[in-house]
Amino acid sequence: YFTHCQIKKDSEVSDNDIATSHLVLLGSPKSNRVFARLANRIPLTVAPTVVKIRDTEVAGESLCYYMVYPNPLNPSRYIAVIGYNNSQYIALGAEESGFFDDVSNYGWYDFKVWDGSTGRVREKGYFNSVWK
């Protein structure tokens, strides 16, 4: 949204990038090395039949999601994770939505999960003030 954003392969993200930048990670822990590095340190679990964010578990084999969270490698910066549990159903920005409710309005929710095959929103919500 009208700002410059460096685009790098996951293999090109440096320690300096982590120290100085907010990160947008695309894909899944299987497809993105930085995401895999953080996977056990953020409240997001991605499996072939489920996506779990915090204590909210959504079952499905065609799920897409986004989540914003403090970067565990640099808590003064944030990560945005945008991905899927099955690459066959990538549908970023194709979920059903109302005003300020779609994926193009990142930041309206701290996290959201939708079905990539139907566009139906399955879960959305916020973390509390201490990211729980």
Image (spheres, rainbow, N blue to C red):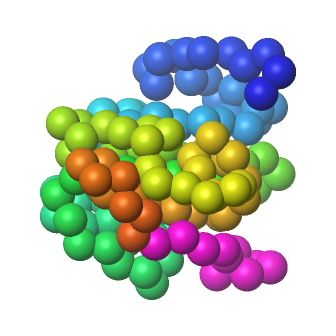
Asked if residue 36 shows in the view, the reply is no
The relative height of residue 71 versus residue 112 in the rendered view (above or below) is above
Q: Would you say residue 4 sits in the magenta stretch? A: no
Give the x, y percent position of residue 107.
Answer: 72, 53
Give the x, y percent position of residue 105.
Answer: 69, 46
Q: Which one is in front, 49 or 93?
A: 93
Most common SS among magenta residues: loop
In the image, 49: left or right of 55?
left
Give the x, y percent position of residue 95.
Answer: 44, 50
**Residue 58 position by quadrant:** bottom left
Q: Would you say residue 124 sits in the magenta stretch? A: yes
* Residue that appears at 67% across and 76% down: 127
Q: Which one is in front, 68 or 35?
A: 68
In the image, 58: left or right of 21?
left
In the image, 42: left or right of 48?
right
* Residue that appears at 43% across and 80% down: 56
Quadrant housing the C terminus:
bottom right
Q: How many marks?
A: 0
Give the x, y percent position of residue 38.
Answer: 48, 51
**Residue 109 position by quadrant:** bottom right
Q: Which one is in front, 91 or 12?
A: 91
In the image, 108: left or right of 38?
right
Quadrant housing the N terminus:
top right
Asked if residue 18 shows in the view, the reply is yes
Query: Residue placed farthest to the front in the image?
Result: 98
* Residue that appears at 43% across and 64% down: 121
Q: Which residues are magenta?
A: 123-132
